[in-house]
Image (cartoon, rainbow, N blue to C red):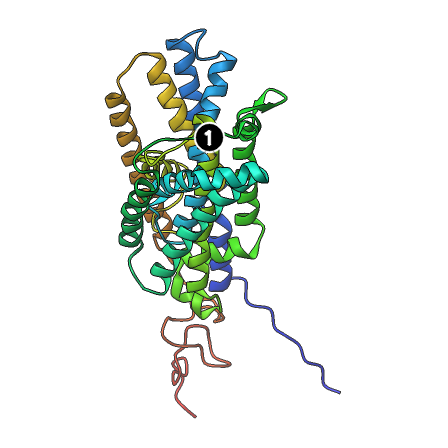
């Protein structure tokens, strides 16, 4: 009985060279851990600057809680934006969706239902309005094949206008005291809004890193056509990404209603810029395919802390806007540099052949069986043909 054996590849083969190149990789600090570590350092530097320039006020517990409260609303929206951008899209309508959700949830009819049943009706209304608008965005982009920038820009104008029509350009007051006390309270000294932000961020991290949905999001953002050929329903997944963004807008609207005790068509103005800036600072590529929830959270905290330091030092909002613009430009330039470095082709090892051929085989031809390595087909190694 014959015995089948498999020959081990030679030690000098190109396969070994490729494995060695892949093993080197970008290094520990070149991956997400390194990028997040850089964000932590930047946040610590801001905190040190705040403690030096505004001693006593910046490190006060009330001031820290104020920073976290301000970061909570932007942070929840930024989590949804992270999914959209990793998936290769963009959502400019998030601020308008927050306004529309807050107005719809504070109408007289909605608040009357909340009084008859429970204030949870207002919460469900806000989330449902945000999810519905996100569904429209997703369908128009995925199945209508409209560019995400244009589709969400149109939704920005339409949602803001609809919010003004519903509210009749007036600010609507939240009447339910139970709603205000629950979301405006705290648990063990931690504001409820901050806890909601932490829960949303944790849920986003699990969804992105520990589920099939997250892996498909990276695949769609990295190469939509390859993802389609791999069996992923790209259009349907794109719709779900925008629905998820709309849901986070609804949650942010509830948080904003509790913080201001109002629903207004002016809520969320320029919120889309803050969210996109936080996501970009957090290391998410604008072209899609790469990003982290942890980086987004750190980006939100960096921008919020920066604004707080400017406020405590009585610096103008114009100077703060200039500083934010400079930070965004630097972050994008750094992203482009890192992306170009990662895409640079590696040099082939000298004498390495194509994968699976013996060491020293010449490119473009395979070695003749039984002949010396590097001999081309038809080459007898200098001996006359027999």
Residue that mark 1 sits on: 174
Instruction: Please tell me which residue lies in front, 97 or 218.
Output: 97
Q: Nearer the viewer, residue 385 or 379?
A: 379
Residue located at (49% from left, 70% from top)? 356
Residue 97 shows in the view: yes
> For this view, does 183 lie left or right of residue 250?
right
Q: Residue at x 27, y 46 (%)?
A: 157
Which quadrant does the N terminus fall into?
A: bottom right
Residue 226 picture location, percent across and down: 42, 66
User: In the rendered image, which quarter is residue 41 located in?
Assistant: top left
- Position of 2 relative to 85 (above/below): below
- Judge by depth and name the residue closer to the eye, 25 or 143: 143
- Residue at the spot 35% in from the left edge and 22% down from the top edge: 307
Say which quarter of the image contains residue 171.
top left
Compared with 220, 50 (above or below) is above
Q: Residue furthest top?
A: 56
Q: Residues within 10 Å of mark 1 (few under 14, many from 20)?
A: many
User: Of all residues shown, which one is farthest toward the right?
Assistant: 1
């Amino acid at each position: 009985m014959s015995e089948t054996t498999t020959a081990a590849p030679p030690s000098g083969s190109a396969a070994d060279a490729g494995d060695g190149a892949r093993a080197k990789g970008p290094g520990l600090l070149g991956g997400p851990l390194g990028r997040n570590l850089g964000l932590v350092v930047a946040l610590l530097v801001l905190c040190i600057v705040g403690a030096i320039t505004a001693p006593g006020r910046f490190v006060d517990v009330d001031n820290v809680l104020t920073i976290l409260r301000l970061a909570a609303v932007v942070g929840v929206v930024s989590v949804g934006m992270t999914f959209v951008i990793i998936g290769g899209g963009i959502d400019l309508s998030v601020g308008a969706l927050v306004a529309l959700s807050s107005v719809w949830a504070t109408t007289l009819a909605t608040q009357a239902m909340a009084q008859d049943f429970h204030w949870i009706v207002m919460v469900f209304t806000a989330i449902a309005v945000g999810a519905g608008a996100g569904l429209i965005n997703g369908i128009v982009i995925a199945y209508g094949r409209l560019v995400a920038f244009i589709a969400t820009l149109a939704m920005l104008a339409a949602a803001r206008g609809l919010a003004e029509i519903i509210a009749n350009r007036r600010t609507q007051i939240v009447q339910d005291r139970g709603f205000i006390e629950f979301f405006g309270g705290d648990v063990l000294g931690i504001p409820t809004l901050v806890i909601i932000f932490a829960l949303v961020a944790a849920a986003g991290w699990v969804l992105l890193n520990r589920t099939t949905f997250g892996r498909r999001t990276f695949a769609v953002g990295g190469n939509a056509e390859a993802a389609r050929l791999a069996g992923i329903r790209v259009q349907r997944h794109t719709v779900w990404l925008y629905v998820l963004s709309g849901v986070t807008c609804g949650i942010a609207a509830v948080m904003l209603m509790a913080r201001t005790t109002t629903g207004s068509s002016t809520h969320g103005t320029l919120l889309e810029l803050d969210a996109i800036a936080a996501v970009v600072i957090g290391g998410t590529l604008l072209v899609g395919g790469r990003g982290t929830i942890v980086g987004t959270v750190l980006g939100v905290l960096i921008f919020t802390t920066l604004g707080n330091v400017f406020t405590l030092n009585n610096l103008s909002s114009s100077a703060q806007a200039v500083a934010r613009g400079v930070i965004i430009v630097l972050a994008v330039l750094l992203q482009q540099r890192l992306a170009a470095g990662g895409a640079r082709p590696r040099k082939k090892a000298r004498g390495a052949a194509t994968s699976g051929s013996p060491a020293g085989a010449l490119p473009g031809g395979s070695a003749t069986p039984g002949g010396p390595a590097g001999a081309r087909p038809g080459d007898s190694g200098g001996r006359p043909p027999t």
